[in-house]
Image: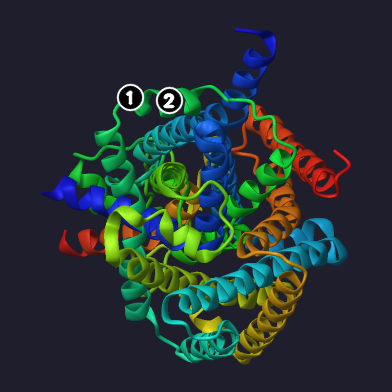
Amino acid sequence: MKSFKKFIGILGPGLISAVSGLEITNIGIFTYVGSLYGFKILWVIVLASIIIALLQQLAVEVGVVMREGVIVKSKKLFGKILTLTVLSSLYVANVVTIAINIIGVSFTINAIAGIPWFLTLISFPLLIFALALRKEYCYLERILTALSFVLSAYIILMVLHFIQYPFSLKDLVASLIIPLEVSKSSYFVDVLAIFGAAAAPYALIFQTSSIIMKGLKIHEIPREFLDISVGLLFTSLASISIAVVAAAYAPQYISTIYDMILALKPLGFIAPTLFCIGILASSTLAIEAIILCNAYMFYEYSAETMNLKDIVASKLYYKTAIATITTSVILAFIHAVLRLEYGGTFTDLIKDSSIIISLTSWIPALFVVLLYWEVKPLASSFIKIVSALIVGSLIVVNVIGILGALGLG
Amino acid sequence: MDLWLLLRIAVYIMGGILPFLYNYYYVKKKVKKGRQAKNSSEENLVVNNFYYSSDAKDVSAGDKNVIKESIEPITIVSSTSIASPHAYDDRSGSTPLYVVLLVDHNVMKNPDALSKIVLNVPKIVDSMESRVHRE
């Protein structure tokens, strides 16, 4: 019983953060690529998830050894101007993530209840702002996390699919082990979108801040790594299941939110409701976390590492919440109007956002790697080289993806 | 299998799974080593037994006469750490005014161990005083 409790204790935080990280960007992009490429692109999803998990490991080591947040330490080591670059890129990635989540919720409610999307686009952020003003939303956070678990329906559907068609399991295993080649012109753009969807740059900031606040010791790092591994397993499983379910049940070209809900058609009439609950809960969780992350970042930049509770009680938090939500709503509105005006679809909106997130994510990743190089007692030469290569590869993926998007690839 | 496919598999493994697992086991091993080193140094550092002596060079725990005769200087002796108070509080013959810490090179480089020794001083002095009063 004791060991079971210990196991659940280890499972908890990693699993919860993995569940809350499963929002509209991931669901949208993985459904889209799953329906378009089938199993052929699964290895990219797994690779992106592992790279993100490795960066999280490095962020843990940086937090434990340096006892300072990424922004504070960057300011000391690399100066204010370079740190401002990280701060700006994180802010852009965060605002774009919030904007696409607001759009996702608005379009989902529009598809299910028929409420015009622009009405939800204004009212949902107001609700988010009201929640952000609450000083204590621990219970709400638990309820939202529990509601986000309805998206685990994708995993259940994948299992049921393989029970029904056991021979396709062999294809799945093969596609996970052997990286298959795809000959489609939009391939590199879609790979870029996958990296953007898998990346959660704000998670790197949270990783170090939570470690500093918990006062984690060096001997506790393996336990934290275990937590990241559990999160990675769940994220990979969930991401693969979304793509597999989309490949099995969704139409071949996904363009609207309704097409995405169609992937859940084996669930019958409850599919739209479950989808709506899951998206609403996970988007709210993600937006609240990002607002907190923004406030934390600005606090670190202007002062120093502080307790999250103190930040929530500070005036800066309210100012950041107002600035973040307002910017996100304006961005969401302009993005949606322009895209729809010029014949774009909901999938295009998600792809745009994922690409912007991917383009801005490599900067914080680079800084985490640079800080890891300074972690003398724990850094290994092999990981130093690999992490530098990974950041280099991320830059190359971004360049190739952009060239592809511009039709120059 | 062609070369291009092998290259892709190598990149897939080297760029993803291997570093993640390697870093996990590397840090685990380092932490384990560090813990073992810490434990062994703590065994030497934590002062549980101390002896009183009028002569710091010749310490005998069993010799009660030493305690009775111990007018000055009272010395706390341990394998690596606390020793030789050179003066006493006039109000009580057993309260040292100074404590000299003998710290070896490894301990000097270990702030945790060093602070542990320093933090242990009041405890040891207290128990030394109470033992003297009992006697």
Camera-side residue: A76 or A351?
A351
What residue is drawn where x is 45% and y is 37%? Answer: B31
Camera-side residue: A51 or A353?
A353
Please provide percent x and percent y for residue B64: 18, 46
Crowding at dot 2, Cα within 10 Å, few <14 / some 14-19 / many 20+, comes out as few
Camera-side residue: B123 or A354?
A354
Please provide percent x and percent y for residue A75: 78, 63
Callout 1 amino acid: Phe
Q: Reply above or below: B43 against A131.
A: above
**Which image quadrant is residue A209 in?**
bottom right
What residue is drawn where x is 56% and y is 89%? Answer: A119
Circle 1 chain:
A
Is disc 2 in contact with disc 1, using a CB cutoff of under 8 Å?
yes
Label total for image:
2
Tell me, yes or no, if residue A216 can be seen here. Answer: yes
What residue is drawn where x is 62% and y is 31%? Answer: A380
